Image (cartoon, rainbow, N blue to C red):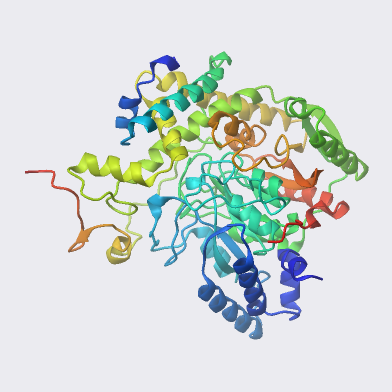
Amino acid sequence: MSDSIDIAHLSKLAQLALEPTEAEHAQADLMRIIDMVDAMQAVDTNAVAPLSNPLDASARLRPDVVTEDDNREANQASAPLTADGLYLVPRVVE
Amino acid sequence: MSNQQLLRQGVAAIARDLAAKKVSSRELTDDYLAAIEASDLNAYISVDADGARAAADKADADRLTGSPAHLLGVPIAHKDIFCTANTATTCASRMLEGFVPPYSATVVERLQAAGVVSLGKANMDEFAMGSSNENSAYGAAKNPWDTTRAPGGSSGGSAALVAAGLAAAATGTDTGGSIRQPAAFCGVSGIKPTYGRVSRWGMIAFASSLDQGGVLAPSVEDCAWLLSAMAGFDAKDSTSADVPALPDFAEEGLPPLRDGLRIGLPREYLTGIQGTVMATAFDEARRLLESAGAEFVDVSLTNTAAAIPAYYVISGAEASTNLSRYDGVRFGHRASDAIDLADLYCRSRSEGFGAEVKRRILTGTYALSVGYYDAYYVKAQKIRRLIQEDFLKAFEGVDLIMAPTTPGPAFRLGELSQDPVAMYQQDVFTVPASLAGLPAMSIPCGFDAGLPLGLQFIGPHFDEASVLSAGHAFQQRTDFHQQLPGATP
């Protein structure tokens, strides 16, 4: 399966902009990683249920009540760009 | 006792000296800060000298008013993956350069409440992805036993600084071996508790179904003392296990080795080290525990070979999801002059993440993408269950499993950094217990040409007590954990 790695498509999905040489290396590495990972296919997993949590637990739900105070100032202290308490992004609507 | 010996004597011994008022926390803290200043191991990313001195002074004052806290005034370091309020937390990534969390991790809060002094933040592989510390954006920490060698990873700074006596102990995290492998490489003790035992709140996420906080220290007893203080249910972590708390090992001591304790030796692990110095050291450890009353039984963990492939699929998939939060908007690195939102996301991430992090994200994205999801991600999760079942079946007949932590001693810096697949194979003995969510602890068990070797005990879910008890019994009969690295820190 590993000969079909489309690194341009993958990096787009992953929101990464790779330089041409970086993309070349990433593709070569990824092909080797996927080859290594393909050893899994030899294991018979018929009738085996996937294990997504090692304790077979699902996320605990909490009562739907407010537990946090408004900490906007503290929470935005490390934000790269804010104004009037809002996060700034490049214009998305002309 | 030399200064290095004093600083390396461990949490329990230091706590006893503090309680007996042989030394003050401030004196100790100043000694550690001086040792850190003189060190060229690059084991710390940041040192908070003023904060540490203030915390030490407070601990000394609290002692005068009769505080009975066992850990009061003991100076430690935190892996730079734990958020520390008002102190920079980088996760060894350019992405989080300048990030100052508005809150502290539960682990940090609990240790602080126990009176522990934090000296600073330990070096690590970027976002905890790596086995050598070479993926740190701040340069690799060095192994104090041989500074041309890797301290292991990802908690490499934690292991190196404990080995060199640059803190009494350090927190760490283990996703696929990130506490145990560096502990083994640096000749210290390190425990990864059961998944869910230690809160992940404020611990920067890598692979959420695997990440588990723990501790590295000179001895098993030291680890036990700290673990009692940092573990326990936390409503803020939705995967925190609501189970009976660990005993306070500082108060109660560690349970002695149970007579007739049955320890399993996994065939699949031992064939991997045949003929090595590790095999000889391991065999001697077995004989020693046998003479102490333990009984050894061969066990088989048949799906061991599939653990590395399954682990790199699952951890990659979870990493690609977790790291999607770094978008250049709310925190972290932001690319300048982005032309639109997509450009902002892509360039911020590409500039902020290092090569290994990008590799993991791409691996995960591949495994989760349309057409490959069942063949890779679901397949890996099925193998994860088989691996867990192997362990559960083994634990029907044994109380613990003993195995080498790594195939050999620390490799050289640069030796594997160009070959990600070879680097991944370093985790062969640590990844299975992580996939199964089991508690596991590495302890020093010998030397290969002057470099430390480690063995691990793996226990049933939530049976940290048996793991610690076996490790403690071994250390009462050996002095590998008391050996100091010759290289001056």
Res. A48 visible in picture? no
Would residue B458 be found to the left or right of residue B172 on screen?
right
**Above/below status of B171 relative to A55:** below
Looking at this view, is B115 or A22 the one in front?
A: A22
Q: Residue at x 74, y 65 (%)?
A: B12
Would residue B289 be found to the left or right of residue B317 on screen?
right
Residue situated furthest right in the rendering = B291
Give percent across and percent down for residue A66: 32, 58
Looking at this view, is B168 or B41 the one in front?
A: B41
Give percent across and percent down for residue B457: 74, 41
Would residue A35 be found to the left or right of residue B467 on screen?
left
Res. B310 visible in picture? yes
Name the image quarter holding the C terminus of chain A.
Answer: top left
Q: Residue at x 29, y 58 (%)?
A: A79
Displayed quadrant of residue B17: bottom right
Displayed quadrant of residue B116: bottom right
Would residue B53 be found to the left or right of residue B91 on screen?
right
Looking at this view, is B16 or B49 the one in front?
A: B49
Q: Residue at x 88, y 39 (%)?
A: B284
Looking at this view, is B467 or B161 the one in front?
A: B161
Give percent across and percent down for residue B460: 68, 39
